[in-house]
Image (tube, helix red, strand yellow):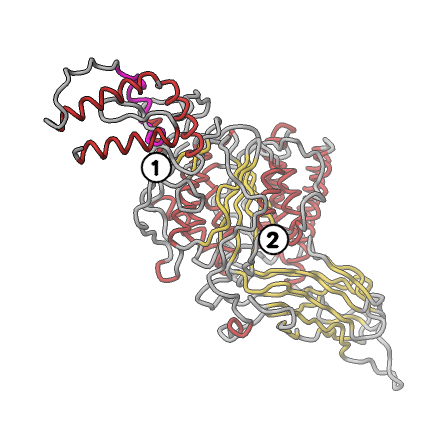
Amino acid sequence: MVPGMRKLKHSFSTLFSSSSVPKSDDSVTHPSPLAVADPGDAPQQQPQPTPPPPPPQHRGSDSNADRSSFSSSASSRLSRSSSSLSRLSRALSIRSSKKTCTICLGDLKIGQGRAIFVAECSHSFHFNCIASNVKHGSQVCPICRSKWKEIPSQAPAPTNVPAPHHHQNRGRARAPPSVPSPPTLLPSFSMREPTRFSDDEPLSVPAASAADHTSSAPSVVAVKCFTEYPVVSAFEAHPEFAVLASIRAPVLLQRDHAPIDLVTVLDISGSMAGSKLSLLKHAVHFIIQNLGSSDRLSIVVFSSTAHRILPLRRMNESGRAEAALTISSLLTDGGTNILNGLKKGLRVLEERQERNPVSSIILLSDGKSQPSVTQPLTLPQLPRTNAIPVHSFGFGTDHDSTALYSISDSSGGTFSFIESVGMVGNAFARCIGGLLSVVAQELQLTVKTLTPGVQITSIRSGRYNNEICDEGRRSVIDIGNMYAEEEKGFLLYLSIPAAPTNEGGEMETKTPLLDITCQYKTLGASEEDLVMVEGERVEIQISSEASPQMTVSLEVDRHRNRVLVAEGIAEAQRLAERGDLQGAKALLEAKRAILLASASATAGDAICTWLDAELRETKERMESRELYEHTGRAYVLSGLSSHSWQRSTTRGDSITQTFVCGDPAAVPASGPIGYETPSMVSMVRMSQNLSITGPWPSPRA
C-alpha cells in the first residue's frame, strides 16, 4: 500500500475505533466541531451526494486509483452516518467549548489577559473573537445556533491611554504600548465573580516602616491655640470662654505618596447614557492616569444589579491598560440600585488579602435609589463601614442626594453635588488630590485643663467624634487621616471661675488653662510607633480691672462664624424638608445678619465673604419648592458635608474653588472658596488642562 493510502486509512481507522462514527476526508466537507465557520458569512454546508464509483482498476497500478476507490467507500459510509456525525459534533463542541474558544481554538482560562464572553446559552468565547463574528452579521451562537437577545459588540481601540502620574511629568500624558481593542461590556453581561473577593493583586513592595517616612519629612503636624480674648477680668466668671485649637498637616515631601486601595462604584443605569457616560469615562481615565504603580484600583458598576468588572489591580503599565479598556467599554441600561453597588465595593476592600495604607471608595450616581432610601442611613447592613470612607458624588439634578449624603456622612467621607455634567472631571480630581496626599493617620487631639475649677463644657468639632471625660478636665477629638497642608480648627468652650487672690491681696497675672497634645501614625508605622506633638500651653492674662479692654481674636471669630453658618444651614434644611421654606429663608437671613456684624467680617475677612455668599445662594435655592427639590437640597447637603469634615467638596456648578488652606493671600477678591489644599488645587488644574488638550480614549456611549 502506498504511503498516502496508509495515512488516510489510518485516519479513518482511528476515528471509527474511537467513536464508531465517520469523520470527513478531503472528498466530503463538514464543519469541524472545534473550528466553527462564521455563520454570518454563509449558511452551513450540507453533505454532498456521493459520486458514482469509477470503473475498477488493477490494484497497485496507480495510487490515485486506490485513493479514489477508498474515498468512494468512505463517502458512502459518511452519507449513511451524517446524522450521527451531527450529534457527535454538537457533543464535542459543548464539551470542548467549556475550555476552548471554538472560533480561535485558544484557551478560555480566566486571568490570561483576554476578556471572556459568556452567552445566555452558556457557551463561552473570547470577547474579541465573538465580536468579530457578530460584526459580519451573525446573531446566533456558533455552537448551538441559539438566537441571542443580547449581542456582544466591538468597541473602538482607545488611543493614547493616559500615563501614570509622576512628579517629573506632571500634567502631561503619554501613550502606552498598543493594546487590543476592548469589547463593549453590556449592562446585563454575565460576569464570573469569585465567591470571595480575595483575588487582589499582591502589593508591589512591603509597607514602608515609620522611619522611612519620618526621616524624609523634617516637619510634623503643627498645633496652635488661640484664646477668644487675651485678657479677662479677675472678678468675673466666664462660663463660655472660647479657645481655638488649630492643627495643620505638614507638606508632602516624600517622592511617592502613600499607596492607596481605591474602588470606584459607578452608576451605569439607563439615565447615564450620552454625555454623562462620556464625561464619566474621561474622569475615571484621569484617576487611572494619576495612580502610581503601588496604588491599586478596582471597578464596580451597578444598574439594576452590581458587578465587579475589575479586581483590585496595581496600576502599573498593564494594570492601567486593563483598567482603561474596561472603562472605555461601558454601556448603560437598567435601574439604579445604589446599595447593591456599594455593598459590592465594600466587599472588595473588606475581603482583600493585602492592604495598602490608605483605602477609600468613590461612589457616583445620577438617579434615585431603587429601593428608595427615605431616611438618613446608618448602614447597619454594611460591614465596618466607618473604617472605609465613601466619597459620594451626585451627578445631575435628579440624583438621590439624601441617600448619597447619608452614605458618605456615616462612613467619614464627603458628598459632592455635580450640577453641571462638565464638572465631573474636576470633582473627581479634587477628591483624588486629597486621597493621594495623606500624611497622617489615626490622628487624635488630646486636651487637658491645668487650673482647678477650669472645665471643658463643650466642643464644636463637626462630625469628628469627641469625648469629654474626668469631669471636664480632659477631652479627646478623633480626626483620622489628614491630607498634606490641610488645616482644621476646633472650638473648645471652657468654664473659667473668678481668679483667686494671694494672701497679700494681689491677683495672679497669668492663669494656665490648657495643655494640648497631638498624636498620629505616619504612613506604614505600627500602632506602637506614634508621633507625639506637644502644643503650646494655653494661658490667659488676668486683670485686676473690673472691665478690662478686650479685643476678640479674629482667628477664633472666623471659626465661630463658620460654625454659626453651618449650624444655620442645617437648621434651615430641616425646616425646608418640613415644607417651611419661608421659615428657612428667614433663619438664613438672621444668621447672615449676625455674620456680617462680626469682628472678622467687618475686618474684611475673606472666609466671611465666602460664608456670606453661601448663605445667599442657599436662600436663593429655597425660593420655591420646585427649585429646592431640583437643586437646593443637593447644594445644601454638599455644603454641610464640607463644613462638617472641614474638607473640600464640589458644590453646584461653581467653576472653581481657589482657597488654599493657610494662605489667605491666595484668596481672590471675589468668587467661591473652600477647604482646598494645594494638592487639590494642582490636581484640578491638571484635570482642566487635560480635559481640553489631553488625549483620551474615545468614549462609546
Give the Cα distance between marks 2 and 1: 69 Å
Which amino acid type corresponds to the residue marked 2 in the rendered image? Answer: Cys
Q: In the image as oriented, which residue stretches furthest toward the left?
A: 61
> In this rendering, is residue 693 above or below 663?
above
Residue 379 image point, x, y percent = 69, 43
Residue 632 image point, x, y percent = 61, 36
* Residue matched to label 2: 608
Cβ atoms at labels 2 and 1 below 8 Å apart: no
Magenta part of the chain: 33-48
What's the mark number on residue 373? none
Asked whether 91 or 174 is in front, the reply is 91
Please state which of the two labelled residues, at mark 2 or mark 1, is closer to the viewer. 1
> In this rendering, is residue 369 above or below 427?
above
Q: Is residue 41 a member of the stretch shown in magenta?
A: yes
Asked whether 212 or 253 is in front, the reply is 212
Residue 38 image point, x, y percent = 31, 26
Q: Earlier in the sequence, mark 2 or mark 1?
A: 1
What's the mark number on residue 105? 1
Circle 1: is it few (<14), some (14-19), or many (20+) Cα within 10 Å? some
Secondary-structure class at tag 2:
helix
The number of numbered badges drawn on the structure is 2
Which amino acid type corresponds to the residue marked 1 in the rendered image? Answer: Leu
